[in-house]
């Protein structure tokens, strides 16, 4: 087959055969990679004739298949090619609009955001009308600047927590943060893991993004440790045993039934997955289960669930308890005076062997992992070992799984941070057996997904933050800003050449941060701890000579901003750098600043080192003090006070 015909098919399938990196360098995806990705998308081609047939099939699918859901903007007409003859629109409010589409394939403008129903020619379609923008900081506190803390939930401590941070510790931490002037606490993902395999704990590789991590339930267990690291297998096993004991004494099944009735199919199938995985002791990856159990609707699965109703009820109970505790933490944050409260974190994907992939197989990519191409941070690219929604699967399902996931993230939060937000527009997909650099970009229906996120933000009155670091599609950032989705501005990247930018030039609509969980802390960066880790592990990165110049540039920016008049401290004095960085963060023009707890505490170690697994204690570090009084340490209180003072200046 010719290169041009292969590229043409790839483009029709949503792939980008040619792409441009963050430095403007143009890259061409190899034929081998294109063929492998197309095969994973059920487009098996080897000859020119097969390429032509595949093109015709895609064109026919687009032309003849009626979507289950279409999206629209508030107050604008909606193009709808399938429309012919008379139609009837029933709005969520009950208002009915009727018209005739014979003279044009457009629905009239609708001013009411919501999920409406269009009936025509004996058929019906959901019309999701998004507001002009999502709920933003201007809705929370018009013209004001707020700040909050970002924390890895598992790292919080309280007496009786069983060795891992829980929702009760989160409530205590939020109340303490509010006393110091914070209006929000952004947390690490609390997505469901695998109760049948307590060795799996990566927050960004969950079993399901439509269920909660039951390890964060506030239930005392027999496991106790003062370790600086979470022992996930031991802590999770002890927590599950304690919860099984608690379930034996549970008697409010009316409340459980009410919860079950409102939680929907996502909860039901997650509980079913957990019951099968735990009770039958199958492998953690459902793709290796006996074939009848790979289908959630098979006769064997239905029979198993009926015969093991108590086990299914137990896993439903776990979600009930987790939801109740999460809601209590948000209530505690708001009652303490926070204007936003908790900001949840929505991971970009899930474990391909987990419950979300099992539950929604037609909506999830198979045979592909997602990751990132080589860039300045990770020069060999990244493969995250996770999967995500398929563009065709989203359209064919009416975006059901995506909507369910977003609603779940916002259910008990004042906002959500969408990890790798460019995943709403395109994903770097890597065929099994290929290196990270051997992937390709797969386009997603960005306009539809952004509209749905905006609509859910409006309905929940919750902020949307988008982690927009890395290689962005052209024009994507303005698209996010127009929708009211706040990007992230991180100290390490706010530079012009070798100079760090003035805080007054930072975007007012974005969220300002000193660092993220994947990057060095301020103290660690200042001390060169990240360089030491990379040298120890043989990973590429900055060297000590480059860092010395960068330290001087950063301190010059601190002095120019007026947050310090001191001479540059020694490289060993990470605390001094953290002091200045906190005040600098407060001086940014951004309407919301999020200070990672590691920088509030001037800790040198970062939560995660991308590109490592067991070599670095990722997602395991515990904080040095109890959640209730961690912020009352004099040095910490001084940093937070400086942040408050700087933002009021």
Image (cartoon, rainbow, N blue to C red):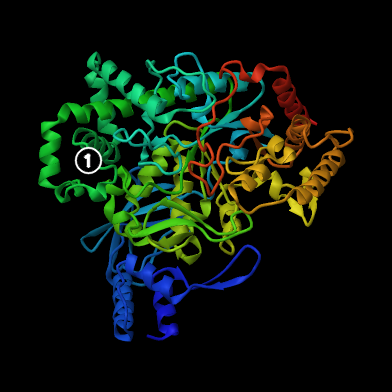
Q: Which of 474 and 124 is in front in this view?
A: 474
Q: Position of residue 571 (x, y in %)?
A: 79, 37
Task: Give coordinates of residue 40: x percent, y percent.
Answer: 33, 65
Q: In which quarter of the image is residue 367?
A: bottom left
The residue lying at 61 percent from left, 57 percent from top is 478
Tell me what residue is drawn at x 10 percent, y 39 percent: 303
Residue at point 66% right, 21% down? 180
Residue 573 as seen in the image, left or right of residue 135: right
Q: Which of 487 and 484 is in front in this view?
A: 487
In this figure, which residue is indicated by the disc labeled 1? Answer: 282
Q: From where the camera sits, is residue 507 visible? A: no
Q: Is residue 342 left or right of residue 60?
A: right
Badge 1: how crowded within 10 Å, few (<14), some, or many (20+)? Answer: some
Work out which quarter of the rendered image holds the C terminus and state it. Answer: top right
Measuring from the top left, give residue 348's x and y in whole percent. Answer: 46, 48
> Residue 339, how many percent across, how many down?
58, 28
Q: Looking at the rendering, which quadrant does residue 266 occupy?
A: top left
Residue 202 shows up from this direction:
yes
Eyeballing the image, is 634 above or below 475?
above
Q: Quadrant of the N terminus?
A: bottom left
Q: Quadrant of residue 322?
A: top left
- The residue sitting at 43% across, 70% down in the picture is 33
Q: Is mark 1 on a helix, strand or loop?
A: loop
Q: Is residue 332 above or below residue 273?
A: above
Q: How many marks?
A: 1
């Amino acid at each position: 087959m010719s290169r041009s015909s292969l590229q043409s098919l790839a483009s029709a399938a949503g792939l980008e055969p040619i792409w441009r990196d963050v430095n403007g360098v143009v890259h061409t995806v190899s034929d081998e990679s294109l063929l492998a990705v197309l095969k994973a998308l059920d487009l098996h081609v080897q000859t020119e004739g097969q390429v032509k047939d595949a093109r015709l099939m895609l064109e026919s699918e687009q032309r003849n298949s009626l979507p289950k859901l279409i999206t629209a903007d508030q107050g604008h007409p909606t193009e709808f090619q399938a429309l012919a003859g008379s139609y009837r629109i029933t709005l969520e409010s009950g208002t009915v609009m009727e018209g005739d589409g014979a003279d044009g394939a457009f629905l009239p403008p609708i001013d009411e955001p919501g999920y409406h129903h269009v009936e025509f020619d004996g058929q019906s379609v959901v019309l999701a009308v998004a507001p002009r923008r999502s709920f933003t900081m201007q809705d929370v506190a018009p013209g004001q600047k707020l700040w909050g803390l970002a924390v890895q939930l598992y790292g919080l401590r309280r007496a009786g927590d069983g060795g891992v941070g829980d929702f009760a510790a989160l409530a205590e931490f939020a109340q303490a943060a509010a006393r110091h002037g914070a209006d929000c606490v952004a947390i690490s993902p609390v997505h469901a893991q695998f109760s049948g395999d307590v060795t799996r704990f990566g927050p960004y590789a969950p079993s399901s993004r439509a269920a909660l991590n039951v390890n964060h339930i506030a239930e005392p267990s027999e496991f106790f440790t003062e370790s600086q690291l979470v022992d996930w297998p031991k802590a999770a096993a002890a927590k599950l045993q304690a919860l099984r004991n608690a379930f034996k004494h549970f008697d409010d099944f009316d409340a459980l039934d009410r919860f079950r009735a409102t939680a929907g199919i996502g909860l039901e199938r997650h509980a079913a997955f957990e019951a099968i995985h735990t009770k039958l002791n199958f492998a953690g990856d459902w793709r290796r289960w006996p074939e009848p159990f790979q289908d959630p609707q098979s006769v064997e699965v239905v029979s198993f669930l009926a015969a093991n109703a108590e086990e299914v009820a137990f896993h439903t109970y776990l979600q009930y308890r987790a939801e109740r505790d999460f809601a209590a933490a948000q209530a505690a944050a708001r009652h303490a005076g926070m204007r936003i409260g908790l900001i949840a974190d929505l991971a970009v994907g899930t474990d391909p062997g987990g419950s979300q992939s099992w539950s929604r197989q037609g909506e999830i990519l198979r045979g592909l992992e997602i990751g990132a191409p080589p860039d300045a941070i990770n020069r060999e690219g990244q493969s995250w070992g996770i999967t995500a929604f398929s563009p065709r699967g989203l359209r064919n399902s009416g975006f059901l799984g995506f909507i369910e996931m977003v609603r779940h993230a916002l259910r008990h939060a004042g906002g959500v941070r969408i990890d790798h937000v460019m995943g709403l527009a395109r994903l770097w997909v890597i065929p099994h057996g290929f290196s990270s650099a051997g992937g390709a970009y797969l386009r997603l229906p960005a306009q539809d997904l952004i509209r749905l996120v905006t609509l859910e933000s409006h309905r929940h009155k919750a902020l949307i933050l988008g982690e927009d670091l890395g290689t962005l599609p052209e024009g994507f950032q303005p698209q996010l800003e127009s929708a009211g989705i706040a990007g992230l501005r991180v100290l390490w990247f706010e530079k012009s050449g070798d100079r760090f930018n003035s805080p007054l030039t930072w975007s007012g609509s974005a969220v300002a941060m000193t660092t993220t969980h994947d990057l060095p802390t301020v103290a660690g960066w200042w001390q060169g701890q990240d360089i030491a880790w990379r040298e120890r592990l043989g990973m590429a990165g900055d060297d000590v000579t480059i860092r010395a110049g960068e330290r001087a540039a950063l301190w010059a920016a601190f002095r120019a901003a007026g947050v310090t008049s001191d001479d540059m401290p020694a490289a060993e004095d990470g605390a001094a750098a953290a002091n200045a960085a906190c005040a600098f963060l407060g001086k940014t023009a951004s309407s919301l600043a999020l200070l990672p707890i590691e920088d509030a505490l001037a800790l040198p170690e970062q939560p995660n080192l991308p590109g490592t697994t067991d070599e670095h204690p990722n997602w395991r570090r515990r904080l040095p003090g109890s959640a209730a009084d961690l912020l009352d340490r004099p040095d910490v209180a001084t940093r937070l006070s400086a942040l408050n003072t700087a933002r009021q200046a």
